[in-house]
Image (cartoon, rainbow, N blue to C red):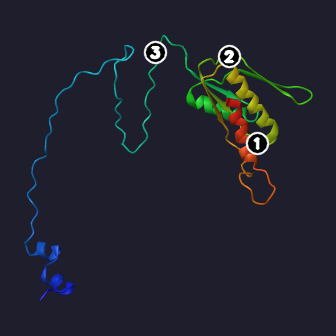
């Protein structure tokens, strides 16, 4: 006759009861295991600087800031450029200082009739360019300024152009809630992608 679940559970002693009776014992603790690794070839130096990993006595859970190793012969020769529009230059300056870079020199003027003129004051040929420009009010002017900045960078042979848009002014119009409505967010995205071609 097969045992039911309750009868099987009653027949087998619980691990706690078995340990208290001395039926289950922990294995004796052994000495720590020592693993020996073979020594491999030494790491090669890159640009004359030997590689190293900085060691900190701080906890592993706290953030660690790694030092930046730069060659003394190269003076701020980075292929990364950050430019600011007129919508929020203080944010752009803060981003650039956080990255340890200077803002790129750019000339942005507005003519009397409202047209926008953009000229880069430094070479961006082969560089990764980041344009920081929110489309906050006045959204249309800031959007057009960003489009002209993208075009200026493209015509100056920038390798990659990335628009950093902290505030996207047309985000509310991302779908149709009623009939005969435009989807302005998609239209603005198409304008940006058209600047790339």
Q: Residue at x 19, y 86 (%)?
A: 4
| Residue 161 vs residue 110, the one in the foreground | 161
Element class at badge 3: loop
The local secondary structure at tag 2 comes to loop
* Neighbour tally class for label 2: few under 14, some 14-19, many 20 plus, Cα within 10 Å: few
User: How many other residues sit within 10 Å of disc 3, few (<14), some (14-19) or many (≥20)?
Assistant: few
Which circle, 3 or 2, is nearer the viewer? Answer: 2
Q: Could you tell me residue 182's position as x and y percent?
A: 79, 51
Percent coordinates x, y for residue 10 in the rendering: 16, 84
Where is 75 relative to 85, above or below? above
Q: Position of residue 36 (x, y in %)?
A: 14, 35
Label 1 element class: loop
Between the C-alphas of marks 1 and 3, the distance is 41 Å
User: What crowding class fits label 1: few (fewer than 14 Cα within 10 Å), some (14-19), or many (20 or more)?
Assistant: some
Name the residue tied to disc 1: 136
Reading the image, the residue beneath label 2 is: 122
Question: Disc 1 or disc 3, which is closer to the eye?
Answer: 1
x 42%, y 37%: residue:
64
Image marks 1 and 2: residues in contact by CB distance under 8 Å: no
Quadrant housing residue 46: top left
Q: Nearer the viewer, residue 4 or 37?
A: 4
Relative to 172, is 12 on the left or the right?
left
Residue furthest to the top: 73
Q: In which quadrant of the rendered image does the N terminus lie?
A: bottom left
**How many discs appear?**
3
Q: Nearer the viewer, residue 33 or 161?
A: 161
Quarter where residue 76 is shown: top right
Left-right relation of 75 to 104: left
Most foreground residue, 58 or 4: 4
Disc 1 vs disc 3: Cβ atoms closer than 8 Å?
no
The label number, if any, that marks residue 71 in the structure image: 3
């Amino acid at each position: 006759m097969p045992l039911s679940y309750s009868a099987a559970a009653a027949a087998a002693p619980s691990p706690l009861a078995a340990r208290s009776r001395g039926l289950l014992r922990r294995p004796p603790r052994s000495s720590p295991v020592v693993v020996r690794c073979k020594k491999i070839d030494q790491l090669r130096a890159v640009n004359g600087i030997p590689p190293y990993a900085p060691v900190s006595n701080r906890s592993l859970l706290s953030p660690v800031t790694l030092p930046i190793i730069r060659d003394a012969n190269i003076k701020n020769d980075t292929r990364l450029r950050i430019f600011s529009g007129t919508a929020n230059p203080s944010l752009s300056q803060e981003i650039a200082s956080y990255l340890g870079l200077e803002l790129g020199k750019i000339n942005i003027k507005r003519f009397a009739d409202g047209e926008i003129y953009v000229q880069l004051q430094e070479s961006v040929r082969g560089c990764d360019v980041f344009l920081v420009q929110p489309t906050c009010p006045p959204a249309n002017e800031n959007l057009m300024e960003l489009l002209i900045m993208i075009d200026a960078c493209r015509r100056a042979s920038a390798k990659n152009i990335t628009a950093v848009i902290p505030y996207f002014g047309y985000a509310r119009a991302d779908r149709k809630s009623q009939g005969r409505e435009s989807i302005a967010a998609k239209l603005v995205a198409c304008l940006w992608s058209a600047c790339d071609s």
